Amino acid sequence: MKKTLAIMLILAVLTGSLFAAGAQEAAPAATPAAAPAPAAAASGSVNAYTTLEEPLAAKLFQLFEAETGIKVNFVRLSGGEAVARLEAESANPQASIWVGGVGLDHITAKSKGLTTPYVSRFTSKTPAQFRDADNFFIGLYVGPLTFVTNLDRAKQLGFEAPKSWADLLKPEYKGYIRMANPNSSGTAYNVLTTMLDIFGTEDKMIEYMKALDKNIDQYTKSGSAPGKSVATGEIPIAIGYAHDQVKLKEAGSPVLITAPSEGTGYELASMSLVKGGKDTVNAKRLYDWILSSPVAQATFTEWYVVLVAEGAAKHPDALSINEIKTVVQDMAWDGDNVNKTRLLDRWTNEIGNKR
């Protein structure tokens, strides 16, 4: 952990060069107050971190610039990377807003004092259960954890697609399953918390993950990467979020998506303002636009996510958590930094470091 933090501190010094435009003069940190009225002619730029898929983020931010004149200079990071980067840069933040990423990571960022509260005039459009009670983050969409199987590879190898978490432990799947590393991926950390919800104790969760590890061929940095490998036929089975997998299926990949019969966890992809961010005004404009713009909502819908804002449209092929069995998640507990650190340390020491 110390080595990782040291590396992130070095990256913090270099981060400024990753953004295309220079930072504006520092603005006061955001506080829970009404959003500013839209400027008649907005201009300038805002530095953002995003955990959305890069093509989605690029399209979304281009549309924002077209509507407002504000350029978004963004860096795509996995959820764990985003929290580590924000922590390393906390004395001199390089970004002002973090868009996307599993809500558990936003809870961790809040508990570490890395984000700041903000009440948009559009906050009320998001039901209370999908936003932080203290206004540090707000949910954008929900997506369940599911399995994706390449049917061509499965037929070639002579096995059926898994239908349950228990199925993933079958000997015939040895070396044929891929998932992300929970230290870098919020998606994979959500797998750990889901197992904790299903089995009830940390010891039983670790016991299951040890058994699953025997069938894992590799752990990736990003939560969406395993599904992409299934789409190309590189690996037969992956664990990830349904919307990423539906996107692959709709693109023509020969895949089957299944929800585990025991129940599954889900993400609340969220958005936060960075504490001490230098582009506060434009960050709030982007925040407000994402919550309110029909163009933004349509763009998300095209990615098969299920938006949580009241009245938001749903793509007919998107998989809602209301359509499948889900576990009861305690997101505040799961995202708490102390709990998360303990679970990740156990997984790393008992599984990750022993590969």
Image (cartoon, rainbow, N blue to C red):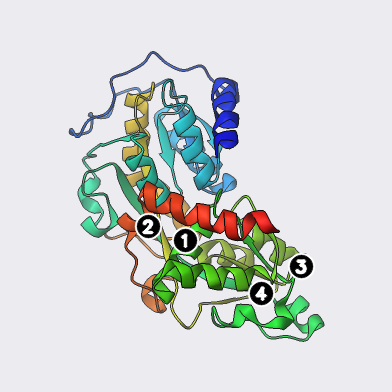
User: Dot 3 surroundings within 10 Å: few (below 14), some, or many (20 or more)?
Assistant: some
Give the mark toward the camera: 1 or 2: 2
Q: Earlier in the sequence, mark 1 or mark 2?
A: 1
Give the percent coordinates (x, y) of residue 323.
40, 78
Give the percent coordinates (x, y) of residue 259.
51, 77
Instruction: Locate the C terminus and report the quarter of the image it occupies.
Output: bottom right
> In the rendered image, which residue does mark 3 sit on?
233
Cβ–Cβ under 8 Å for marks 4 and 2: no
Q: Earlier in the sequence, mark 4 or mark 1?
A: 4
Give the mark toward the camera: 3 or 2: 2
Q: Is residue 186 visible?
A: no
Give the mark toward the camera: 4 or 2: 2
Q: CA distance from mark 4 to mark 2?
A: 28 Å
> In the rendered image, which residue does mark 4 sit on?
149
Cβ–Cβ under 8 Å for marks 4 and 1: no
Q: CA distance from mark 3 to mark 4?
A: 9 Å
> Looking at the image, which residue is at 54% across and 25% down?
12
User: Dot 2 surroundings within 10 Å: few (below 14), some, or many (20 or more)?
Assistant: many
Cβ–Cβ under 8 Å for marks 1 and 2: yes
Q: Earlier in the sequence, mark 3 or mark 4?
A: 4
Query: Residue 58 bears which disc, if any?
Result: none
Residue 114 as seen in the image, left or right of residue 45: left
* Towards the viewer: 21 or 176: 176
* Towards the viewer: 310 or 195: 195
* Secondary element at image label 4: strand
> Looking at the image, which residue is at 43% across and 38% down?
98
Instruction: Locate the N terminus and report the quarter of the image it occupies.
Output: top right
